[in-house]
Amino acid sequence: MKKKVYDDLWVLSLTYLVLGFFNILFAWLGLLCFFIPLIIAVGKGTKGYCNRYCGRGQLFGLLGGRFGLSRKRDIPRWMKSKPFRYGFLAFFLVMFVQMLWNTYLVFAGATELRQVVTLLWTFRLPWHWAYHGTLLHPGVAQFAFGFYSVMLTSTILGLITMALFKPRSWCVYCPMGTMTQMICKAKNRGENA
Amino acid sequence: MANAKSAKRRAVVSEGECVACGCCVKACPVQAISVYRGIRAVVDGLRCVGCGRCAAACPASVIEIREATA
């Protein structure tokens, strides 16, 4: 198939991850990976984002495919089952709400800004070098730290399953993918599928 | 392989398990597979040549290459 401009969006995903090491406020850009798939799913009723534009999927495809960093084995049956996919989505959303709550607490002045990136919802890595103070409220930075934690955590999970299974095995349990597919199913209900 | 020419092989998607990611669409050399309304991948049986690239690319491994019965 002819290569399109959007086939190189993996560059943006990689850049995003790198920028987070220098200035955490760039993490806000990650909201694009959140809203664009939803807007396409709700507006058009397709998974156009997954199918064409997802830079993360492309990155996994490149690393696992061309660079050969994947065993290319079948993903275990339970990982592609609906209970796991919906369960992971639910878990992800709960963690997301918790992150928003922590952000709210900083905005409300109830807690101090914590300059940490939390990996796999457990490990708190000091990340103060990527925050240089700002004219904005510390809550803005707290959201950035939280959102970058989400993005880095999911990238790491994706890299692990990329290595173990097929390159883009993250796509099987990606919460955004599961969510957009649910939206598409609901939106296209009654269509002759 | 006497009947290799007559037996047509084609990709078959396991309907309920497809995550509609579109990896197969990118892998297909003859544009025979597409994602139907963000729900699942659909194979155009007339175009599919049964090469198996979609099956290899599918991260959920829900595409099989089968010999067409008809």
Image: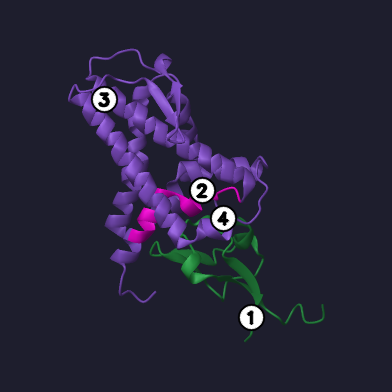
Chain colours: A purple, B green
Residue A52 position, x and y percent, is 45, 50
C-alpha distance separating marks 3 and 4: 36 Å
Residue ID for mark 3: A140
Q: Element type at marker 1?
A: loop
**Up-down relation of residue B22 to residue A16 (above or below):** below
Q: Residue furthest bottom?
A: B70
Q: Are discs 1 and 3 located on one and the same chain?
A: no
**Which element carries disc 3, helix, strand or loop?**
helix
The number of discs equals: 4
Q: CA distance from mark 1 to mark 3?
A: 58 Å
Residue drawn at the location 34% of the way across and 62% of the way down: A184
Farthest-out residue, right:
B2
Q: Crowding near pointer 4: few (<14 within 10 Å), some, many (20+)?
A: many
- C-beta proximity under 8 Å, tags 2 and 4: yes
Most foreground residue, B59 or B30: B59
Asked if one can make out residue A74 in the rendered structure from this viewpoint, the answer is yes
In the rendered image, which residue does mark 4 sit on? B59
- Does the segment drawn in magenta span residue A168? yes
Q: Could you confirm whether marks 2 and 4 are on the same chain? A: no
In the image shown, does A47 or A112 lie closer to the viewer? Answer: A112
Image: magenta residue range = A166-182
Say yes or no: labels 2 and 3 on the same chain: yes
Is A189 on the left or on the right of B21, as rendered? left
Give the letter of the chain under mark 3: A
Instruction: Name the chain under label 2.
Output: A
* Residues at marks 2 and 4, CA–CA distance in whole angstroms: 8 Å
User: How far, Cα to Cα, is label 2 from label 1?
Assistant: 31 Å
Nearer to the camera, B25 or A105: A105
